[in-house]
Amino acid sequence: MADMSYKEITSNGLWKNNAALVQLLGLCPLLAVTGSVVNALGLGLATMLVLIGSNVAVSLIRKKVSDAVKIPAFVMIIATFTTCTELLMKAFTYELYLILGIFIPLIVTNCAILGRAEAFASKNNVISSALDGFMMGAGFAVVLLVIGTIREIFGVGTIFANMDLLFGPIAANWTINLFGEGYGFLILVLPPGAFIVTGMLIALKNIVDSKLEQLDAAKKEPLVKGAKRMRTTGTIS
Amino acid sequence: MLVKSIRFNSFVLGIFALITAALLSFTYEGTKERIAEAKREVAKRALLEIIPLTRHDNDVLGDTVKIPKEYLSILGIKNGEINLARSKDELIAIIVPSIAPDGYSGKIQMLVGINVDGTIAGVRVISHNETPGLGDKIDLKKNDWILDFNGKSLENPKPKYWKVKKDKGSFDQLTGATITPRAVVTQVLRTLQYFEKDKVRLLEEAKLQNSTKNAPSIEAPING
């Protein structure tokens, strides 16, 4: 674990050990705010920011803090970064902040963040930790974004609605209305929709993983050939 | 040994607390003004939607009157101020904050604009937790149901008909949602009734503020 290559860190964060789909951490905000693309993107970016900041800070102090006070120190760091992010969002994207509401301060309780601080940043150098924070955050944000997109498209029939909350007035008419006015598929907008979509994504990831494994196995097979044991049971026709 | 370790650890944590507190106060100081600005901006936009700039020429956001304590419970709020809209120094409408306590999922926070003649200038929902797709049609972004209130008053319809059609009133309910519009209609009615009771004092107060503000330059405003 101590010396992972950057490639490994990247694939870990984005796919193999994805915070949302594999570790299933931070599900509460994941399920609650992914009703639309803009909400998902807002929370994803905020979480990523906190994750990078806390990983770097934890890595910087990893040799100076004894085990006894490690956790309180980490919590203090994470709380600070979360509050800073909250203030910044209030200052620059106030209306988005109003929508995301309690879930911004709640980033502090996202286990993915304390988990990365404890499991990775406290054992690795600053650059690896920053990259890990970025990749873990990106993995989380991408999942949020995918769920948000699916729920927005099929739930309300739009995509990129209200993007001006995040990108300012230029984005005011980015909204694409896919199925015409009045379309709505309520269950996807409501919390059960979040569970359903997340479940399907996890299933999809498992399918892809097992396909990849099969491919790998198929590739390896020729090497084993020739060294096979003789068949000793059954009939040979 | 133990004492030494405790001392060392508390020292480290203390330093930490100092650094993080410093970082926080730094960010706070840096963003304080922008946040206040953003808050004002949002509040102002809601007010301007109800009473557009074509109808008034004063600073609605800054022109306020306190709501007396005895009326706070009718309006469902803990504290708040009424914004006054004037045109040529004459009061034309007031905007009252009001909260319906009985939405489908919690409180529905609204702004109710009332013209001085007692008709509704406009109602906007500021925040709510109603069901997306059903109850959230009270939000103008989703549906123009809320515009139905424009021009209504305690005379039209009579208070007994300030209900949704399902309850034999004269307001449409929303498809799939009755509780939400019921709550909104009732609260708008309560707000109108508040205005009825407090009208005399409000007009008096508004006139007073006006004359103290522009005392030397302008003769007594003609007011209705």
Image (tube, coloured by chain):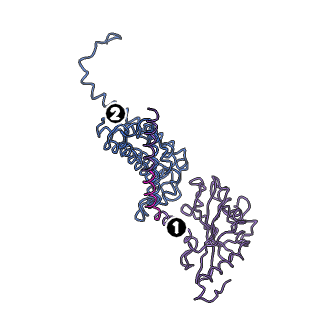
Expressed as whole percent of the image width and height from the top left, the position of residue B212 reads 62, 82
**Magenta span: helix, strand or loop, mainly?**
helix
The residue depicted at 58 percent of the width and 65 percent of the height is: B144
SS type, badge 1: helix
Expressed as whole percent of the image width and height from the top left, the position of residue B48 reads 55, 72
Which picture quadrant has residue A166? bottom left
Mark 1 and mark 2: Cα distance apart in space: 50 Å
What segment is highlighted magenta in the picture?
B20-33
Q: Is residue B86 left or right of residue B18?
A: right
Q: Amino acid at mark 2?
A: Met
Along the line of sight, the residue nearer the viewer: A195 or A139: A139
- Residue B40, which numbered label? 1
Which picture quadrant has residue A235? top left
Q: Residue furthest right?
A: B160
- In magenta segment, residue B23: yes
Along the line of sight, the residue nearer the viewer: B83 or B131: B83
Q: Is residue B194 left or right of residue B142?
A: right
Q: Colour of chain B?
A: purple
The residue depicted at 56 percent of the width and 64 percent of the height is: B140
Expressed as whole percent of the image width and height from the top left, the position of residue B139 reads 57, 61
SS type, badge 2: loop
Q: Amino acid at mark 1?
A: Arg
- The chain assigned the colour blue in the figure is A
- Residue A172, which numbered label? none
Residue that label 2 marks: A1
- In magenta segment, residue A73: no
